Amino acid sequence: MLSAGVHLADQFDVTKLQAKLGGFARLYCPIAQTLDLSYHWSIMGNRFNVRLPGARIKHQMGSASIKMYDKFGLILRIEVTVNDITFFKQYREVRHRNGESTMQWAKMKKSIYSLPALQETLLAANRRYLLLKRLHVHGLIKKVSRRYKYYLTELGRQVVAMALKLREMVIIPELARLAVQA
């Protein structure tokens, strides 16, 4: 097993990786070109030699954290880090000691095969975080102190009531009318 890993590492083309990372940097961080900045890529970690002044907010739950970086009020970057992916569960095949296997919710395995499920989980976390932030900024929800829970404000209740009325009085009748015409 070790020799297979060494063989894969020997075949790894760092210049292709650097070119790909440079493409991502140009695509997702165009301000770097405008400010004539460059990146230093390191295989051993996330060390970049470009540091723009700004603010960082970090929220942590267990071994996972979401960090939000604001650079000059121009660039917003959200980063999710996980130190132990077994913190998350995934619906997967579980092999039991008696030889049987079943599909069930189980801790995520520390394996390259868990990467797609981990990516899906972390993207969902980013989306939920952004949605909660939007709802909070607009005053629709408020956080319960010292808890991972939120409640609807009076404005939030009014918005939900209006959305339900719109669905019932406009959207559903319009969809029904379109279905009859088809």
Image (cartoon, helix red, strand yellow):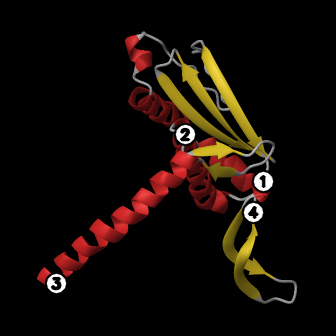
Category of crowding for the residue at label 4, using alpha-carbon neighbours closer than 10 angstroms: few (below 14), some (14–19), many (at least 20):
some
- The residue that disc 1 covers is 2
Element at label 1: helix
Question: Residue, x 69% and y 78% (percent of image)?
Answer: 93
Category of crowding for the residue at label 3, using alpha-carbon neighbours closer than 10 angstroms: few (below 14), some (14–19), many (at least 20):
few
Q: Earlier in the sequence, mark 3 or mark 1?
A: 1
Query: Disc 1 and disc 4: Cα gap in Å?
Result: 20 Å
Q: Earlier in the sequence, mark 3 or mark 4?
A: 4
- Give the percent coordinates (x, y) of residue 66: 67, 39
Kind of residue indicated by mark 3: Val
Quarter of the rendering occupied by the N terminus:
bottom right
Judge left or right: residue 127 versus residue 88: left
- Give the percent coordinates (x, y) of residue 56: 65, 24
Residue at the far top in the pictured view: 36
Which residue is at the front of the view, 2 or 31? 31
- Give the percent coordinates (x, y) of residue 68: 61, 31
Kind of residue indicated by mark 4: Lys
Kind of residue indicated by mark 1: Leu
Mark 2 or 4: in front is 2
Element at label 4: loop
- The residue that disc 2 covers is 139
Query: Disc 3 and disc 1: Cα gap in Å?
Result: 65 Å
Q: Which mark is residue 180?
A: 3
- The residue that disc 4 covers is 109
